[in-house]
Amino acid sequence: MPTNAPLNRKLRMGLVGGGQGAFIGRVHATAAVMDNRAALVAGALSSDPVRAKASAPDYDIPPDRAYGSYKEMAEAEKKRSDPIDFVSIATPNHTHFEIAKTFAEAGFNVVCDKPLTFDLKQAEELMGIVEKSGVVFAVTHNYTGHPLVRQAREMVLNGDLGEIQAIRAFYIQGWLRTRLEEGGQKQAAWRTDPKQSGIAGCFGDIGTHAYNLGRYISGLLPLEISAHLKTFEPGRALDDYGTAVIRFENGALGTVTASQISHGRENDIFIEIDGTKASLEWHQENPNLMFVRKNGEPQRVYTRGGAGLGAAASSSTRIPPGHPEGYLEAFANIYTAAFDAMIKRAIGEKFETVNTIYPNVYDGVEGMLFITQCVESSKQNGAWLPFRHATSRK
C-alpha cells in the first residue's frame, strides 16, 4: 500500500525546539518518523536564531528551511508549494500558546508537548482557535500510546473490570532531590522556574501525566479535587512533591501522587485500578506486562503482543511477542493516530476531534484545569474544589 494512502506521500514535519542540548525535541523527531509516514523537513530549533540554524544539520534540515524563529517558519512555509503538514512543539511551557496559536491560525496541524499552555486561560483560548481553524491537534501524553494502556482502556470500557471504584496513579522520580537548577542544568532550570513552567513544578510536569493516564483508561468524569503540594528542597520556587484526591462522577475515588525528590527513583509512572469484578496494574518501567486480578482466581498476566489482546492494543504493536517495546514506540503511537486524522483532513474527509485515541486539545485543557485546581486547593489547605470542565470527554 502506498505511504499514507490515499494521500500517497509522507507527511512533512516542522519542529519548533529541540536544538542543541535539548531532550524532548529529538524524541519527537524520532517518534514521528518511526513508521515511515513522516519526514522532518523544516525547523526553528531554538529561540536563539544562531543556535536554531546551527542545530539544523543535526536533523538533516536543509539550510533554506532552517528558520531563525517559529514566526519566520510559519510565514515562509505557508508560501511554499510543498509546505509542512504539521508542526511539533518541543519547547518550555510558557512558549506553547503563541507557537500553537500561530501555526493553528495559519492552518497547520499541531502536535504539542504537555502541559498544553502556561495557564488555563491560554488553554481555553487555544481550544477556541483549534475549533475555529479545524486543524488536527494532538497533545503528547505519550504514556497513553503504550499497547497495554490501550488494552486496559478497552477492558474497562467493555466492563471487564465492572464498575470502577478506585484509581491510584503515581509518577515517582528522584532527579530533583538536589538543586540541579542552581548548576545550570537546562532541564531542571526551566522546570523549576515559575516564569517558564507556570504555577506548578512537579505536579505540572509529571503529575499531569499520572492524572491523564487514569482518565484515559477509566473514562470517568471528575467532579471535585483536593490537593496538597509541597516544596521540600529549600529555596526551590515550585512544588517538588504532591498528592491529590479526586471524586469522580460515578462515586469513585482517585489519587494522584507525584514526586521528583524520591531517592533512586527514575521514571516510575504506574497505575492501579479497582473495579467491582477485577483490578489491574501497569508500570511504565516494565511496560510489556499488565496484571489483572480477581479474587479466587489465578492472577492473569497480559503481555504486549501476546494472545487475547483487543484491537486497540494489537494495532499499537510493531514486533512479535517477547521483543520489548517501550517509550519511543508509545510516543510514535500518538503520532501515527494523529497522522490518520491529518490525512483525512488533507483529502477533505471528516475526522474525529473529541473522542480520539490520542490525547487532544480538550485533554490539554483538562490538564491545565487539573494544575490550576491542585495549586489553588493546596493554597487552601486541601479544600475541595470543583473539577469538571465543560469540554471534558469520556
Image (cartoon, rainbow, N blue to C red):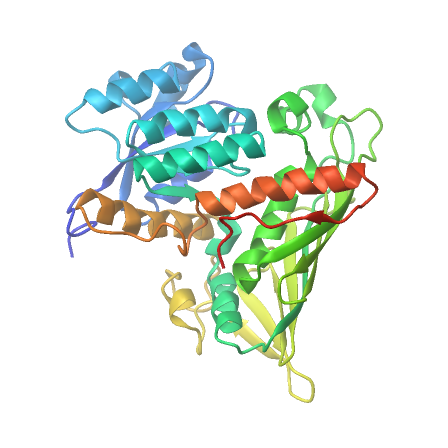
**In this view of the protein, which residue sits in the foreground, 253 or 229?**
253
Residue 16 visible in the picture = no
Q: Is residue 320 left or right of residue 371?
A: left
Q: Across the whole image, how many numbered discs are drawn on residues?
A: 0
Q: Residue 167 at what x, y percent from top left?
A: 66, 63
Above or below 11: residue 284: below
Q: Is residue 319 left or right of residue 372?
A: left
**In this view of the protein, which residue sits in the foreground, 72 or 164?**
164
Q: Is residue 47 left or right of residue 385?
A: left
The residue at the point 82 percent across, 24 percent down is 235
Direction top: furthest residue: 50
**In this view of the protein, which residue sits in the foreground, 83 or 372?**
372
The residue at the point 53 percent across, 64 percent down is 288
Q: Residue 169 at what x, y percent from top left?
A: 67, 57
Quadrant including the N terminus: bottom left
Q: Residue 342 at what x, y percent from top left?
A: 27, 45
Above or below 17: residue 295: below
Q: Residue 33 at what x, y percent from top left?
A: 33, 42
The residue at the point 69 percent across, 89 percent down is 296
Residue 26 visible in the picture = yes
**In this view of the protein, which residue sits in the foreground, 72 or 224?**
224
Above or below 54: residue 360: below
The residue at the point 57 percent across, 62 percent down is 220
